[in-house]
Amino acid sequence: MSSTDTNTEHPIDMRISAVPDRNGRYGECGGVYVPETLIEALQQLDEVYQKVCNDHHFWERLGDLNRVYVGRTTPLYQANGLTWRSRSLNEDKELGATIWLKREDLAHTGAHKINNTLGQAMIAKKMGKNRVIAETGAGQHGVATATAAAYFGLKCDVYMGSEDIRRQNLNVTRMKMLGANVIPVEDGSKTLKDATNEALRDWMGSVEHTHYILGSVVGPHPFPMIVRDFQSVIGRETKAQALRHISAMPNTIVACVGGGSNAAGMFYPFVDESDVRLIGVEAGGRSDTPGDHAAPLTYGKLGVLHGSMSYVLQDESGQTSPVHSCSAGLDYPGVGPEHSYWKDSGRVEYTTVSDEEALEAFIWTARDEGIIPALESSHAVAKAVPIAAEMHKDEHLIVNLSGRGDKDVEEVARLLGDKL
């Protein structure tokens, strides 16, 4: 496991899901680009996770927690209000797919992040580590990490950019109530990238007793694989629910993409289902000008960020570019290597939604469905409604509603002002 491992050859008939390879590569993306001080910790994590993969007691315990603690299975909900809104965009009465919402907002802590943090906390216990750290942007991963730490009796420190602390103050309070120490990060843009930098620095000096619960499908191998596997419960449930509700696979699935954990968890069980269209929605921000958006798959190029190769927003000299999104959880200049692989393979389509469109979809969902969505999830809704309008009336589109919007109401009110 090292940054010099560059074997990226795959059999021509390989299933899209059959990654990473033994070197942690997803095509030419992924790998391990970290200081030597972290190599041993990553190797230990990889070895423990490989054992966990074959440990039915581990998965039985996690399944029990998902049921009685997280509240899984989360519902697949027919969104009649958003479906009506979509169909009203088109006068052709034969058009307008039925829109469904996968309600990850109803999971304990209010988002999909708990799916990953419980699993990683269990791994930390197996490794004999009594402290966990995390990075957070929107605060949902921080809350989920603090929750898992409280449940398992682990010390917890969460790094969060001071700008994100300002706009996500509710989640800061929740983390503190759960016993976590929230550490403000004042460097750079004071957002998710900078929080991740500080968490990695901490881990380099504390690997003997600390596990880093990375919150998305980013970072060095084996993190992207581990987070994807824990989050894949979303897609597996959705498959079974679609067969029950519509007696078929969905025609289209839409999810927002920042680092990409909710989308990876939803998409992964479907990537070998070639008839299912998969669409990832990045943060288009204010414009396509560098610094005005957070859309590395749309505007970025391959580079190394936080320990792995993936699409990264960067300037001509290769320095990471500043980013912007109204959504703290999408405000990140990179993306997971598996998303980069899916882009290169053509399996998943990636597009953008602007701040303005996401804010509009936030209000649509609240007023059409009585559901206040996370701003991150609102990006997916904003793209899903016009896409559904062009689909046949007998077709079905599923949106991964990755989180609830309690954390965003003050920021949305500030941004919309008199328009609310």
Image (cartoon, grey):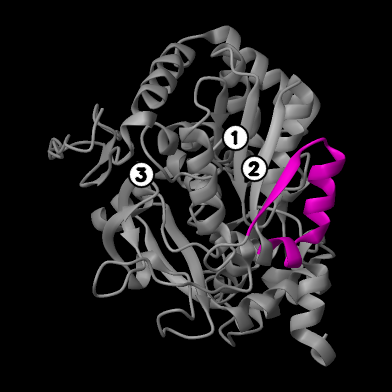
User: Which marked residue is nearer to the observer: mark 3 or mark 2?
Assistant: 3
Q: Is residue 236 visible?
A: yes
Using the image, determine if residue 370 lies above or below residue 150.
Answer: below
Mark 3 or mark 1: which comes first in sequence?
1
Q: Which mark is residue 116?
A: 1
Amino acid type at mark 3: Gly
Q: Is residue 178 magenta?
A: yes
Q: Secondary structure at mark 1?
A: helix
Q: Is residue 361 magenta?
A: no
Q: Specify start and end residues of the magenta stretch as a single range.
A: 164-185
Give residue 180's position: percent from left, percent from top: 76, 38
Q: Quadrant of the C terminus?
A: bottom right
Q: Classify residue 401 by image quadrant.
A: bottom right
Question: In the rendered image, which residue does mark 2 sit on?
Answer: 113
Q: Residue furthest bottom?
A: 418
Question: In the rendered image, which residue does mark 3 sit on?
Answer: 307
What's the CA distance linking mark 1 and mark 2? 6 Å
Q: Residues within 10 Å of mark 1 (few under 14, many from 20)?
A: many
Q: Classify residue 170 by image quadrant.
A: bottom right
Q: Residue furthest front?
A: 205
Amino acid type at mark 1: Asn
